[in-house]
Image: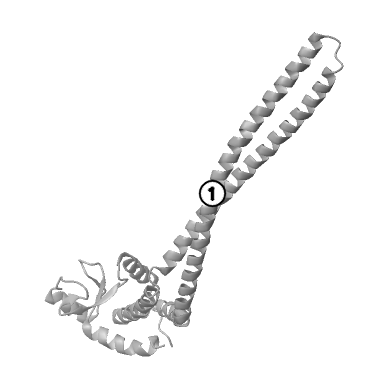
C-alpha cells in the first residue's frame, strides 16, 4: 500500500526532491541545446509584424494620394469642359460686359487647372518617395521572412531530435512531483526560478554545496547526513543533501532518465 504524502519521512522527501531535480536538470539541458533560437524566432516574428504594419500604412497612404490625383484630374477635366463651354458662349454674346464675364470664368477655370496640376505634381513626388520606401520595406520583410523560415526549420529540427525525450521527462517530472507535498514543491520551484542554473537541491562536495565556495560547518554537515530535517543553505538558499544520497539517487535515476 502506497504511503500518503504526510506519512513520508524527511529522508524520502529529500530523495524525491533530488530525483525531481535530476529530471528537471535534464529537461533544462535539452532546452538549453536550443540556445537562443526560440527567442530569435520570436524576435523575427515581432519585427516582421511591425514592418508589415508599416508597409500596410504606406500602401494606404499611396492609395489615398492616388485617389487625390484622380480627384484633381476630374477637376481638370471639368474645368476644361467649362472653358470650352464659356468660349463657345463668347461667340454669341451681345456686349462686352458678357464677354468679359465669361473671360473671367475662363481665367478662373485656368487657375483651377493650374492649381490641380500643381497638386498632382506634389502627390506624384510623394508617391514616388513613398513607393521607393515601400519597395525597400517589402524587400526587408521578404529577407527577414526567409531568415525566419531558415531559423524555424533549424528550431524544428532541434526540437524534433529531443521532443520525445522531453515529453517523456515532463511526464516523469509530473509523476515525481506527486511524491512531494505542495508546500515543499512550491519552495523547490521558487528556488529553481531564482537560480540561474535551475539547481534547487544540491549535494555537498568537500564540505561545500555544489557550485559554492562557502563551507558548511561540521555540525550542520552531520545534520544533513542524518536526513532528519530539510536544511537550507544560508548563502544560496538551496536545499542541501549529503554526498552519499546524491550518489545513490544518481545511480538509481540512470534507469529513469535513460532514453
**Colour convention:** one colour
Residue at (30% x, 89% y) in the render: 251
The image shows residue 111 at horizontal and vertical percentages of 67, 24
In screen coordinates, is 244 left or right of 117? Answer: left
Residue at (61% x, 44% y) in the render: 62
The image shows residue 245 at horizontal and vertical percentages of 26, 84
Residue at (85% x, 14% y) in the render: 93
Judging depth in this view, the residue of 232 and 33 nearest the camera is 33
In screen coordinates, is 92 left or right of 155? Answer: right
Residue 74 falls in which quadrant of the image?
top right
Residue 116 falls in which quadrant of the image?
top right
For mark 1, give the secondary structure: helix
Judging depth in this view, the residue of 105 and 243 nearest the camera is 105
Judging depth in this view, the residue of 166 and 43 nearest the camera is 43
The image shows residue 219 at horizontal and vertical percentages of 13, 76
Residue 73 falls in which quadrant of the image?
top right
Q: Residue furthest left?
A: 218
The crowding category of the residue bearing disc 1, from other C-alpha atoms within 10 Å (few below 14, some 14 to 19, many at least 20), is few
The image shows residue 257 at horizontal and vertical percentages of 39, 85
Q: In this figure, which residue is indicated by the disc labeled 1?
A: 132
In screen coordinates, is 143 left or right of 180? Answer: right
Q: Quadrant of the C terminus?
A: bottom left
Residue 78 visible, this angle: yes
Amino acid at each position: 500500500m502506497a504511503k500518503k504524502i504526510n506519512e513520508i519521512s524527511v529522508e524520502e522527501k529529500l530523495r524525491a526532491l533530488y530525483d525531481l531535480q535530476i529530471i528537471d536538470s535534464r529537461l533544462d539541458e535539452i532546452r538549453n541545446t536550443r540556445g537562443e533560437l526560440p527567442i530569435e524566432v520570436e524576435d523575427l516574428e515581432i519585427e516582421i509584424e511591425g514592418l508589415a504594419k508599416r508597409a500596410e500604412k504606406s500602401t494606404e497612404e499611396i492609395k489615398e494620394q492616388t485617389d487625390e490625383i484622380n480627384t484633381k484630374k476630374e477637376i481638370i477635366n471639368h474645368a476644361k469642359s467649362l472653358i470650352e463651354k464659356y468660349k463657345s458662349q463668347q461667340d454669341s454674346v451681345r456686349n462686352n460686359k458678357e464677354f468679359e464675364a465669361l473671360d473671367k470664368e475662363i481665367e478662373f477655370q485656368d487657375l483651377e487647372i493650374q492649381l490641380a496640376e500643381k497638386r498632382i505634381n506634389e502627390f506624384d513626388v510623394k508617391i514616388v518617395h513613398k513607393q521607393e520606401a515601400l519597395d525597400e520595406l517589402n524587400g526587408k520583410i521578404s529577407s527577414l521572412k526567409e531568415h525566419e523560415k531558415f531559423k524555424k526549420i533549424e528550431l524544428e529540427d532541434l526540437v524534433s531530435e529531443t521532443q520525445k525525450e522531453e515529453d517523456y521527462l515532463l511526464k516523469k517530472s509530473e509523476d515525481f512531483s506527486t511524491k512531494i507535498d505542495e508546500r515543499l514543491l512550491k519552495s523547490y520551484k521558487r528556488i529553481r526560478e531564482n537560480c540561474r542554473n535551475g539547481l534547487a537541491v544540491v549535494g555537498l562536495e568537500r564540505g561545500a554545496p555544489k557550485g559554492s565556495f562557502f563551507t558548511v560547518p561540521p555540525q550542520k554537515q552531520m545534520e544533513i547526513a542524518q536526513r532528519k530535517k530539510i536544511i537550507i543553505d544560508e548563502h544560496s538558499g538551496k536545499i542541501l543533501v549529503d554526498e552519499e544520497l546524491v550518489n545513490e539517487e544518481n545511480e538509481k535515476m540512470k534507469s529513469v532518465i535513460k532514453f
